[in-house]
Image (tube, helix red, strand yellow):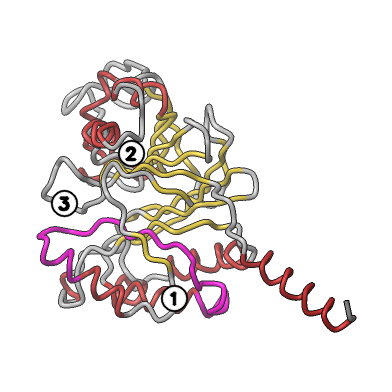
Amino acid sequence: MSYRSLFILLLLSANLFAQQKQPSAFQVVPLGVKGGTDERNLSAYMLAPIATNDYVCLDAGTVYAGIEKAIQNKVFKVSATEVLRKYIKGYFISHAHLDHVSGLIINSPGDSSKTVYATDKCMQMMQNHYFNDQTWANFGDEGKGFLIKKYHFQTLKVGEESNITNTSMTVKALSLSHVNPYESTAFLIRNQNDYALYLGDTGPDEVEKSNKLALLWKEIAPLIQQKQLRGIFIEVSFPNEQPDKSLFGHLTPNWIMKEMNKLSDLTGKEALKGFKVIITHLKPPAINEAKIKKQLTEQNTLGLKLIFPQQGKRFEL
């Protein structure tokens, strides 16, 4: 074999090796994917390191009904009660709106002891308005009324990495704006050298008069460049026809793509080709959901891999 032929063969082998699919790091089971009106299908995503049952629940709008849906889809081979009590190791609440916490509240009597994680303002709202021994029994270990102490309420400090109890994962909470000055939260989950980013409800910086998404993109850009961030969960609640004055702290296809282009300015466009973006919180009716999907697909000039999760259907990152 000539040196030239050998060189070409080595070059082809190197290209094939570079194109090999990166093995999955996380598994995701959506328990609820929508942004309102259907109480059976509200924001909640179980996430765990691949090949484990050490899940955390990212928001908890719908829980038990979503687990039952996953069982129907043969994701789990045990009962819904066992998944609730043994597989879910803790809950991360991005903000205290009911469509993100109702499943946690309603299922608390049948749940097992575990940790509920939230930032300070969100935790205060849950303790003052939900787990307050009046609206609902206080299943936590702090707050008002009689403390049942089933849940440990762990307040996260923004920007600090914390261990997630009974898992190998860590979390860093980052601040979002959801109708400024109301706060929401993004959770950056790490398992060893792999990351996943989940955003609660958020509006675009320009509308919110905020820089919180800009700071978030700066935080995660190096992780994308190093191929450590496996995907972003981000909401798109309305189609482009929704006027800015009626966004109420949410995104449209236009706005998310503007934000993704800001992210690409930091990462380089090539780094975002094929990068997984999981679209959450689509608000019914169905005609709006169809519009959102169509508009996102048409405006995806960056070549993102858009994922539209379905309730109870597992996927990997």
Q: Which residue is mark 3?
A: 36
On the image, which quarter does residue 141 sit in? top left
Q: Do the CB atoms of the residues marked 2 and 1 lie less than 8 Å apart?
A: no
Residue nearest the viewer, comparing 68 with 102: 68
Left or right: 171 in relation to 255? right
Magenta span:
264-291
Residue at the image point whose x is 29% and y is 41% from the top:
312
244, 230: nearer the viewer = 230
Q: Secondary structure at mark 2?
A: helix
Q: Report if residue 284 lies within the magenta region.
A: yes
Q: Magenta includes 13?
A: no
Between residues 116 and 60, which one lies in front from this camera angle? 60
Q: Quadrant of residue 6?
A: bottom right
Decide which of tag 2 and tag 1 comes sooner along the chain.
2
User: Which kind of residue does numbered mark 3 sit on?
Assistant: Gly
The answer to which of marks 2 and 3 sits earlier in the sequence is 3
Sequence order check, earlier mark of 3 and 1: 3
Q: Residue furthest bottom?
A: 4
Mark 2 → mark 1, Cα distance in angstroms: 40 Å
Identity, as a three-letter code, of the amino acid under mark 1: Gly
Q: Amino acid at mark 2?
A: Gln
Where does the image place residue 224, in percent across and percent down from the top left?
A: 57, 65
> Which residue in the rendered view is the most extreme toward the front?
1
Crowding at dot 2, Cα within 10 Å, few <14 / some 14-19 / many 20+, comes out as some
Q: Position of residue 29 (x, y in %)?
A: 36, 42
Residue position for label 2: 124
In the image, which is nearer the foreground, mark 2 or mark 1?
1
Is disc 1 surrounded by few (<14), some (14 to 19) or many (20+) residues within 10 Å? some
Q: Which residue is disc 1 drawn over?
A: 303
Left or right: 62 with respect to 154? left
Label 3 crowd (10 A; few <14 / some 14-19 / many >=20): many
From the image, state whether disc 2 or disc 3 is nearer to you. 3
